[in-house]
Image: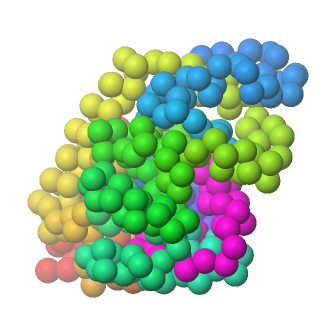
Amino acid sequence: MLEHGGRLRAAAQRQGIPLGDWLDLSTGIAPYGWTLPPVPASAWTRLPEADDGLEAAARDYYDAVSLLPVAGSQAAIQALPRLRERSRVGLLAPAYAEHAAAWEREGHESLQLDGDAIDRQLEALDVLLLVNPNNPTGRRFAPEQLLAWHGRLAARGGWLLVDEAFIDCTPQHSLAAHCDRPGLIVLRSFGKFFGLAGIRLGFVLAAPALLERLAELLGPWAVNGPARALARVLLQDPLGQREQRRRLRADGRRLAELLSARGWPPSGGCALFQWCADPRAPALHEFLAARGILTRLFQQPLSLRFGLPPDEAGWGRLERALQAFEEHSA
């Protein structure tokens, strides 16, 4: 399996630091969220049903005509390559590695792209797959550019697949409202923005014909009843969403400022994480881990991704550790 952030138990065992003493900054998941409503007993005792209001709430939230709930966007990432004949798939690097792995597993050819060269490489592709904003670099692509690329791909039966896992704080940049166009597929993650990664819920936004094929492949009851019940309530809470968006944006800026002040100016990022490309990344990663602070280390290029601290104690702990590394390295 590919390496991911959030492997806190492994880090605790490796460092000999109790699990409860860690500050986990290794994911791009919101470290805070909602006071959760009670889950109806029927959500536990009955099979999930598609007419419970979840799809309608999600269509309103995402401003999407048609969508399919899935057990986390990871389920769609692994299933979608099975819906095409052998294709040439262009992906940025670095990016979320599960995408390339899923297409290669199904026998497709993956090609690493330079973001600045996509326009001239597009004719060689059957599928263009982008994470927007990109994970881990935070690079963004304008909706107008993405739609232009989609038009060129769709004209010859190709796909534009856009993973918008980190776009909830900037919904104006989403392609969700255009997802009924053939050949355009948008993935949305529920857990990251709402701070509920354990719920394992995501949505695929696409034309109905493709969603029907995907639903048949995934089978019935893909999303469990308690997840559907909780998500339906949160998707219909605009005041809570507005406050979450405000807080995440503010904390994203605060994290960028803190890192810059301590000699680690971000190379990119978004509201949910900041990314620092620096040859010193492995040294800082180990230095922080020895102090119970987990970050996400990338090898190509050498870089660290920092998620948001959950509270003032976490902010203070991160700042002190960065200052200690600065003094240690002087």
Taking 188 as reference, is 129 above or below it? below
Q: How many marks?
A: 0
Q: What residue do we see at 67% from left, 46% from top? A: 209
Tell me if 124 is positioned left or right of 303 in this view: right
Q: What residue do we see at 70% from left, 63% from top? A: 83
Residue 96 at x, y percent in the picture: 49, 67
Q: What residue do we see at 39% from left, 40% from top? A: 168
Q: What residue do we see at 36% from left, 81% from top? A: 121
Tell me if 218 is positioned left or right of 300 in this view: right
For this rendering, which residue is in front, 93 or 111?
111
Residue 214 at x, y percent in the picture: 72, 51
Tell me if 97 is positioned left or right of 258 in this view: right
In this picture, which residue range is highlighted in magenta? 71-98
Specify the quadrant that holds the N terminus. Answer: bottom right
Residue 81 in magenta stretch? yes
Residue 169 at x, y percent in the picture: 33, 39
Residue 55 at x, y percent in the picture: 62, 28
For this rendering, which residue is in front, 328 or 9?
9
Residue 191 seen anywhere in this rendered image of the structure: no
For this rendering, which residue is in front, 22 or 310?
310
**Colouring mode (rainbow / by chain / secondary structure / one colour):** rainbow
Specify the quadrant that holds the C terminus. Answer: bottom left
For this rendering, which residue is in front, 143 or 239?
143
Residue 118 seen anywhere in this rendered image of the structure: yes
